[in-house]
Image (spheres, rainbow, N blue to C red):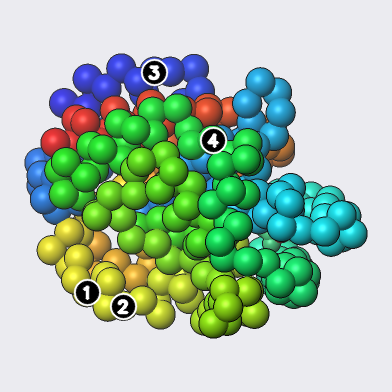
Amino acid sequence: MSAQIPELSNPSVCMKDPQRVQDILHSMVKAGSNTLQVISDFDMTLTRFSHNGKRCPTCHNILDNSKVISADCKQQLDHLLHTYYPIEIDSSRSVEEKLPLMVEWWTKAHDLLVEQKIRKDLLAEAVSESEVMLREGFQLFFDHLHEHSIPLLIFSAGIGDILEEVIRQAGVFHSNVNVFSNYMDFDESGVLRAFKGELIHIYNKREGALLNTGHFQELRTRPNVLLMGDSLGDLSMADGVQDMENILKIGFLNDKVEERKRSYLDSYDIVLIKDETLEVPNAVLIQDC
Ligand code: TMP
Ligand code: MG
């Protein structure tokens, strides 16, 4: 049945075990779309990694490149990015080695942002003036899930307020969308004073999922999961799902392809290499309904 998905023959698609993918798809289609939930990372998964050869921004980069940040702060945030991003994508280091360094990155970046006394009312402009782009096919992706009442959880180590603004401005922040992310805490005059709750970074999404058991409890009649991510840390986003029956994991491999391909193929069922579109996830969803 799922051999009928022609998009799985796209040149960007790699699979370690295509038969396994067929079997999972077959079970999910049989169970029906009312048993499905989608859990997706945001930065570099729902958003593009690059456009016309130029890198696209993450939620954090949207602020880093905006007028709400002083030139000095921008320089410091750029320095952090150039220090820690190579560590994030370094396949020669273990997660155990990277984890404390990622906490360090997030903590330093958030401390710098808080020092900037960012005003809530300037966030929408920072987003509209940025070069952020959702991946090609985003409209179909969000609209299809909404039309079929399939819950979409966006689980991001980015910044919730920015992420929401991106999808709001794109006209796809539908009622079936829930977001777990780092949210800003503003004082009564609308000035950033802290970030709320437990920090979410790329390697603690499991803990984040387990803190939100209520969400997954509500979705317990949906034991089939489509998971989408671009980091190996995204694989634990579904750890809170109750009584899971089938999970299909789609991973975007955007950068350092040769070094990371093996580990992505070992962890994700479908790996999309330098694919800036949502064509494959859309094809999977459409055949599922
Ligand atoms: P994600 O979970 O939505 O993909 O968000 C995490 C991304 O944010 C991760 O790839 C690193 C990126 N990031 C920045 O670009 N700048 C920063 O200052 C920080 C802390 C993270
Ligand atoms: Mg990401």
Q: Residues within 10 Å of mark 4 (few under 14, many from 20)?
A: many
What residue sits 45% from the left and 55% below the top? 164
Q: Is residue 154 visible?
A: yes
**Residue under label 4:** 133
What residue sits 34% from the left and 43% below the top? 172
Question: Which quarter of the rendering shows the C terminus?
Answer: top left
Mark 1 or mark 3, earlier in chain? 3
Q: Residues within 10 Å of mark 2 (few under 14, many from 20)?
A: some
Q: 66 and 254: which one is in front?
A: 66
Mark 4 or 1, which is nearer the eye? 4
Is residue 104 positioned above or below 188 on the image? above
Instruction: Return the mark for residue 217.
Output: 1
Q: Are marks 4 and 1 in contact (CB under 8 Å)?
A: no
User: Viewed as shown, does residue 110 lie left or right of 269?
Assistant: right
Q: Is residue 230 visible?
A: no
Q: Is mark 2 within 8 Å of ligand 1?
A: no
Separation of residues labelled 3 and 4 (CA atoms)? 25 Å
**Residue under label 3:** 9
Secondary structure of residue under mark 1: helix
> Residue type at mark 1?
Gln
Separation of residues labelled 1 and 3 (CA atoms)? 36 Å
Secondary structure of residue under mark 4: loop
Is residue 193 positioned above or below 109 on the image? below
Q: Are marks 1 and 3 in contact (CB under 8 Å)?
A: no
Secondary structure of residue under mark 2: helix
Q: Are marks 2 and 1 in contact (CB under 8 Å)?
A: yes
Q: Residue 178: where, in percent of width, then height?
A: 33, 61
Mark 1 or 3, which is nearer the eye? 1
